[in-house]
């Protein structure tokens, strides 16, 4: 492996560009990119300042001069590209969902274990310092036994029948849309912070916009163009999930991509016997800590945070950090793992991607069969 890591990015839309920036900041060379056609790859290489455009994503994941592959394509390509990358000896950062179903995600966990390479999934909200502070408070016992875990993940970018994206198509995005796309982030954060795992759940899903005008080439968050035929939609816009955890708490989450005015409202509350903690992704500079006698705001100031949280507070208090900083910290951690062979605390890997697939599968089964469903735990050889 070269001293300076050589990164390559397959898929250069919304999140591919975020990966490119973080890879550079983490000290890698961006040796190449691939988009959906050679022409688009050339344009993306120019735009992102990559050294070259690959002919295809398949050529990128097997290239000799690449150490780390970032898979940032639509969902249906994650499994074949990540698998091919691991088989040709590349470390992999693969976007969520890892695969379109549990079997595919399990195959990737096994492939990563067999390869001995680093295999990470960008559950990047874990990298907010205030979220880490909540996790530390829970770990230290300050919050007390957790009883109720609840929240929302709301967006509005698929609000109208003219809004469209490849995610709407089950063959490209998977049979779950809203839950797999954003509900999976909420569940990851909840389990990561609380150290509880969802044991069983009951879910209801709705396709609020039953027909959409086709424009699945539209960029993420830019869905409307008023062109294309109208077709029926099969994937859900809204999911409500009620759950019980393995450690005796109950909870719920509301997930929606059709909530007007909500852009990325990932909001989570952990209610314990001693205090409640609230993390709000759209106001991530402060953690709300409620106690019966008083409520406190804990600002993201490295002087005031515990060391595991302060590790990610790289600006002084009062100088806001945000989503991009989380991505930078995540990629930095993965590259550190690539160099040292040791995963830093809290780095999300393919096992976490499989966990998300299992929860998503339980949500879809529950909604279809109108019953409580146990969330499977996978056994994977390591
Ligand atoms: N972790 C996060 O916070 C986060 C945020 C956004 C998106 N995502 C995930 O990232 C992935 C991409 O989402 P997006 O919002 O960037 O989508 P997007 O539509 O903006 O970008 C997708 C890109 O993939 C390219 N592409 C399509 N087919 C290809 C092919 N055969 N080979 C190579 N490239 C191809 C397209 O040209 C486009 O550049 C999704 O899996 C999504 O779930 C994760």
Image (cartoon, helix red, strand yellow):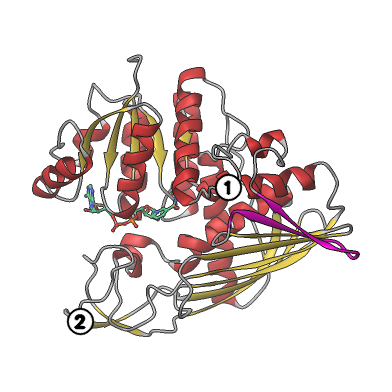
Q: What percent of the width, then of the height, locates residue 109?
A: 49, 38
Does the stretch in magenta take in 290? yes
Q: Position of residue 381 (x, y in %)?
A: 58, 32
Q: Picture quarter containing residue 280?
A: bottom right
- Along the horizontal axis of the image, is 74 left or right of 368? left
Q: Label the magenta part by its dominant secondary structure.
A: strand
Queried on whether the Cβ of the residue with tag 2 lies below 8 angstroms from ligand 1, the answer reads no
Q: Is 65 drawn above or below residue 186 in the view shown?
A: above
Q: Residues within 10 Å of mark 2 (few under 14, many from 20)?
A: some
Snapshot quadrant of residue 344: top right
User: In which quadrant will I find the N terminus?
Assistant: top left
Relative to residue 113, is residue 174 drawn left or right? left
Instruction: Please report the residue visible at 12 percent of the width from the left and 38 percent of the height from the top.
Output: 55
Q: Give the left or right position of residue 8, taking residue 259 as reference.
A: left
Q: Residues within 10 Å of mark 1 (few under 14, many from 20)?
A: many
Q: Position of residue 93 (x, y in %)?
A: 41, 38
Q: Residue at x 86, y 61 (%)?
A: 291
Q: What stretch of residues is rendered in magenta?
A: 284-299
From the viewer's perspective, is residue 166 above or below residue 40? below
* Image mark for residue 128: 1
């Amino acid at each position: 492996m070269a001293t300076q890591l050589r990164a390559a990015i397959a898929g250069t839309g919304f999140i591919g560009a975020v990966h490119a920036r973080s890879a550079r900041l983490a000290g890698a060379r961006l040796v190449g990119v691939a988009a959906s056609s050679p022409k688009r790859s050339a344009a993306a290489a120019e735009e992102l300042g990559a050294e070259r455009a690959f002919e295809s994503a398949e050529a990128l994941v097997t290239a000799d001069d690449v150490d780390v592959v970032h898979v940032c394509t639509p969902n249906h390509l994650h499994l074949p590209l990540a698998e091919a990358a691991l088989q040709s000896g590349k470390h992999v950062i693969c976007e969520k969902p890892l695969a379109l179903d549990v079997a595919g995600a399990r195959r990737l966990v096994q492939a990563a274990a067999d390869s001995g390479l680093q295999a990470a999934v960008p559950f990047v909200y874990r990298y907010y310092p205030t979220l880490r502070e909540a996790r530390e408070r829970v770990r230290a016992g300050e919050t007390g036994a957790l009883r109720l875990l609840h929240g929302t993940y709301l967006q509005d970018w698929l609000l109208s029948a003219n809004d469209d994206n490849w995610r709407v198509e089950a063959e490209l995005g998977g049979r779950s849309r809203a839950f797999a796309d954003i509900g999976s982030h909420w569940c990851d954060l909840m389990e990561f912070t609380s150290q509880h795992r969802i044991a069983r759940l009951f879910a209801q899903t709705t396709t609020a916009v039953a027909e959409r005008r086709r424009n699945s080439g539209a960029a993420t968050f830019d869905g409307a163009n008023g062109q294309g035929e109208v077709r029926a939609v099969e994937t859900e816009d809204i999911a409500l999930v009620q759950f019980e955890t393995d450690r005796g708490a109950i909870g719920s989450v509301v997930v929606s991509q059709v909530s007007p005015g909500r852009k990325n409202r990932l909001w989570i509350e952990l209610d314990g016997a001693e205090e409640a903690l609230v993390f709000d992704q759209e106001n991530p500079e402060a953690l709300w800590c409620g106690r019966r006698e008083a409520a406190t705001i804990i600002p993201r100031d490295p002087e005031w945070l515990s060391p595991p949280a302060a590790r990610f507070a790289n600006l002084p208090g009062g100088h806001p950090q945000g989503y991009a900083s989380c991505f930078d910290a995540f990629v930095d951690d993965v590259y550190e793992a690539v160099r040292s062979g040791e995963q830093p605390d809290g780095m999300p890997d393919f096992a976490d991607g499989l966990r998300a697939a299992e929860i998503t599968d339980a949500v879809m089964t529950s909604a279809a069969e109108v019953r409580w469903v146990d969330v499977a735990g996978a056994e994977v050889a390591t």
